[in-house]
């Protein structure tokens, strides 16, 4: 790709990013105004008029689950935390229209949420789910898809991890993950104090920060950005033409880290 085509590509990418931000904001404003209109129609004159509030939330008590080795979650609008605890258990907070469904079947925990909710109930700001597994649990396969919401994984042992987030941040902390494939459309990805063998991160818009995970002098690294900067152990890296920035190195540890982002910085410390 010549320099002129690259510049055209970057301009188009910038315009697409601006459109995503605009329509994403408009999406939430419509939901907020819908809540306000509902208040007025139903004569709720005593309310404090927080138009971003969604009513009729359900808070579940911690529910004990049967043991499982796999997780398959498909979420619409929800912040998701998976961490170690005393038992296999789940708790959540959600509006009545977005209450998650979950069951353990064939050694797999299946979690889902209703799709295609009413446009006037988009502002599901407070939906969250917390899942715990025992400290000695070994998850063979964790697949998690989330349309809108943050994802946080803490102190887990995972053989294979697949994360796909449309809008929201992803945090991986203090976990042992053999193989992981992470896809983020809009949101930051933070990875800290994790052990791994193979890790691939693909991001459209957002920063990638990796701390105390990748050993730059020992691991094989292949990272690139279209718009942004790369920082490897406090040193900036870019290729010759200065437009499409990349960094590659070959290590002897047997570990391989690959990452790319269209718009955003990549930092490995």
Image (cartoon, rainbow, N blue to C red):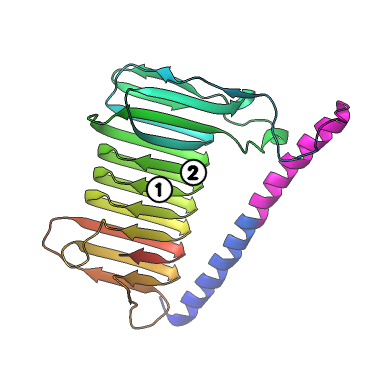
Image quarter hosting the C terminus: bottom left
Image quadrant where residue 152 sits: top left
Magenta segment range? 22-47
| Image position of 56 (left or right of 217) | right
Residue at 62% x, 62% y: name it.
18
Compared with 66, 201 (above or below) is below
Compared with 20, 147 (above or below) is above
Q: Is 29 part of what is drawn in magenta? A: yes
Compared with 141, 201 (above or below) is below
Residue that carries the numbered disc 2 in the rendered image: 150
Residue at 57% x, 61% y: name it.
17
| Image position of 31 (left or right of 147) | right
Label 1, label 2: how many angstroms apart (C-alpha)? 8 Å
Image coordinates of residue 194 in percent, x first then y, are 27, 49
Mark number displayed over residue 129: none
Badge 1 or badge 2: first in the primary sequence: 2
Image coordinates of residue 204 in percent, x first then y, are 47, 58
Q: Is residue 185 visible?
A: yes
* Closer to the camera in the image, 152 or 113: 152
| Direction left: furthest residue | 252
Image quadrant where residue 162 sits: top left
Question: Mostly what secondary structure, the magenta segment?
Answer: helix
Residue that carries the numbered disc 1 in the rendered image: 171
Image coordinates of residue 58 in percent, x first then y, are 60, 22
Image coordinates of residue 255 in percent, x first then y, are 18, 55
Image quarter hosting the N terminus: bottom left
* Closer to the camera in the image, 165 or 90: 90
Element at badge 2?
A: loop
């Amino acid at each position: 790709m010549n320099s002129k085509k690259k510049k055209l590509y970057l301009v188009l990418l910038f315009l697409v990013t601006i459109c995503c931000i605009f329509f994403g904001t408009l999406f939430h404003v419509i939901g907020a105004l819908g809540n306000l209109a509902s208040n007025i129609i139903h004569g709720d004159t005593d309310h404090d008029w927080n138009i971003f509030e969604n009513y009729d939330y359900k808070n579940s008590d911690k529910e004990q689950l049967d043991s499982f080795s796999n997780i398959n979650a498909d979420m619409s609008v929800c912040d998701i935390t998976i961490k170690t605890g005393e038992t296999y258990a789940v708790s959540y907070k959600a509006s009545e229209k977005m209450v998650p469904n979950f069951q353990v079947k064939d050694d797999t925990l299946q979690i889902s949420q209703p799709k295609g909710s009413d446009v006037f109930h988009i502002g599901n700001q407070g939906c969250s789910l917390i899942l715990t597994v025992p400290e000695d649990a070994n998850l063979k396969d964790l697949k998690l898809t989330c349309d809108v919401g943050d994802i946080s994984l803490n102190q887990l042992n995972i053989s294979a991890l697949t994360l796909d987030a449309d809008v929201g941040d992803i945090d991986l902390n203090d976990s042992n993950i053999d193989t992981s494939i992470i896809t983020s459309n809009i949101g930051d990805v933070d990875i800290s104090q994790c052990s791994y063998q193979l890790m691939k991160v693909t991001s459209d818009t957002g920063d990638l920060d990796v701390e105390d995970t990748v050993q730059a002098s020992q691991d094989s690294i292949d990272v690139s950005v279209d718009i942004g900067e790369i920082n490897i152990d406090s040193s900036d890296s870019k290729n010759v033409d200065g437009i499409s920035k990349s960094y590659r190195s070959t290590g002897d540890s047997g570990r391989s880290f690959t990452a790319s982002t269209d718009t955003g910085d990549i930092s490995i410390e």
